[in-house]
Every structure is written in C-alpha cells, then in structure tokens.
Amino acid sequence: MLGWIITLLAIAAIAALLGLGRISGVALSLAQLLIVVALVVLLLMALGVFAL
C-alpha cells in the first residue's frame, strides 16, 4: 500500500508541474484516501482487533 501512496504522490507532483490540475487533484485525493485506510488498519492492528 505504501508503494501505491508514493506512486500517486509522484503522479500528482508531476501533473502539477505540467499544469494538469485535475489529474493532480485526483491523484492527491486517492493518495489521501489510501493514507487514511493505512492508518485505520495500523490502528486496528495496534489494538489487536485486526491481524494480517
């Protein structure tokens, strides 16, 4: 999941540099969503509710 987050952030940065605002916004939104999912999974694992 970390790989996807880094990839989406890189796509957002490159798109922003090229002036592609919508693509940059979509990539950033997806990266934020994945970060939230990763933090929730980490919290659940820390509490012992969820195990991989």
Image (cartoon, helix red, strand yellow):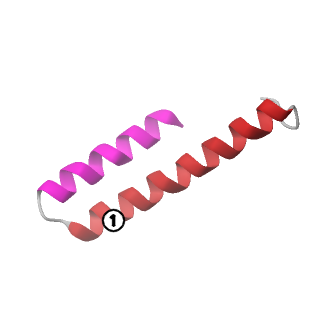
* Residue 6 coordinates in the image, percent (x, y): 39, 38
Residue reaching furthest to the left: 18
Residue visible at 69% across and 46% down in the picture: 40
Q: Nearer the viewer, residue 6 or 39?
A: 39
Identified by mark 1, the residue type is: Gly
- Quadrant in which residue 49 is drawn: top right
Point 19% across, 58% down: residue = 16
Q: Position of residue 20 (x, y in %)?
A: 18, 65
Q: In the displayed structure, does residue 10 sit left or right of residue 33?
A: left
Residue 14 shown in magenta: yes
Magenta stretch: helix, strand or loop mostly: helix
Question: Quarter holding the C terminus?
Answer: top right
Q: Secondary structure at mark 1?
A: helix
Vertical position of residue 39 compared to residue 2: above or below = below
Number of disc labels: 1
Furthest residue toward bottom? 22
Task: Examine the structure image and report whether residue 11 is included in the region drawn in magenta.
Answer: yes
What residue sits 54% from the left and 49% below the top?
34
Q: Which residues are magenta?
A: 1-17
Q: Which sits in the foreground, 39 or 14?
A: 39
Q: Residue furthest right?
A: 49
Quadrant in which residue 50 is drawn: top right
Judging depth in this view, the residue of 3 and 37 nearest the camera is 37
Question: Which residue is labeled 1 in the image?
Answer: 25
Viewport quadrant of the N terminus: top right
* Disc 1 residue crowd, few under 14, some 14–19, many 20+, Cα 10 Å: some
